[in-house]
Image (cartoon, grey):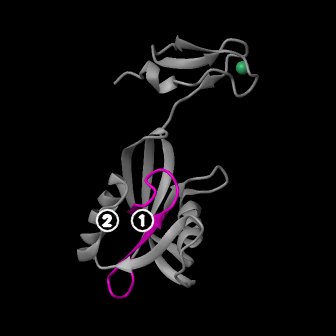
Amino acid sequence: MEIKESSYKGVNFCLRCSGRMNLVKDRENKLRSRCSKCGWNYYKNAVPAVACLVINEAKEILIIKRLVEPKPGFWALPSGYIEINQSPEEAAVDELQEETGIVGEVKEFLGYYDGTSPIYEKVLSLGFWLDIKGGHLEAGDDAGAAKFVPFSRLPKLAFDAHTFFVDKIRRKL
Ligand SMILES: [Zn+2]
């Protein structure tokens, strides 16, 4: 599928030299946003994120209540965008601790979900199953609440990616 012009909406100035960005076709005939002054390309990619799946001894799953956009007020898995200074595994461990107080260790990579986002157009979510290594359950600044629930009482989650990962892990338990 072709890259749409709308994917570059709002990309007006170069992040390197502040020059005007133009829409051009590259050598492979792909639509790019390129700086008219320095030639720098703005590549529009899916934003990488992690989702954390944590199961307790009672076979319940850990969820948090979101306070921030997108989807504030919805329940979700502990999750977040991967920062430039983190590996995917580090992002999962850090997000889990920040949002729930639980110190985790990655046990298994559960796969990816190629999803859409109202903010970034596309988000590539990586699902990680983590073992509990320490800490204690307490909702962090980004979460209104954090709790373990049985799969039978799981509320509708904020993101399709999270529902996808929950289905995956459920089949492994
Ligand atoms: Zn430039």
Q: CA distance from mark 2 to mark 1?
A: 9 Å
- The disc at residue 77 is 1
Q: Secondary structure at mark 2?
A: helix
Question: Residue 134 placed where, x, y %?
Answer: 56, 85
Ligand 1 visible in quadrant: top right
Q: Amino acid at mark 1?
A: Leu
Question: Residue 158 placed where, x, y %?
Answer: 37, 57
The answer to whether the residues at label 2 and label 1 have Cβ atoms under 8 Å apart is yes
Magenta-colored span: 55-78
Q: Is residue 172 visible?
A: no
Q: Is residue 173 left or right of residue 8?
A: left
Q: Is residue 35 left or right of residue 172?
A: right
Neighbourhood count class around disc 1 (C-alpha, 10 Å): few under 14, some 14–19, many 20 upward? many
In the rendered view of the protein, which quadrant contains the C terminus?
Answer: bottom left
Residue of label 2: 166
Residue name at image x 55 percent, y 85 percent: 136
Residue name at image x 41 percent, y 21 percent: 4
Residue name at image x 42 percent, y 65 percent: 77
Nearer the observer, 79 or 82 = 79
- The disc at residue 123 is none
Q: Is residue 23 visible?
A: yes
Asked if the magenta segment contains residue 67, the reply would be yes
| Depicted 58 relative to depicted 121: above or below | below
In the rendered view of the protein, which quadrant contains the N terminus?
Answer: top left
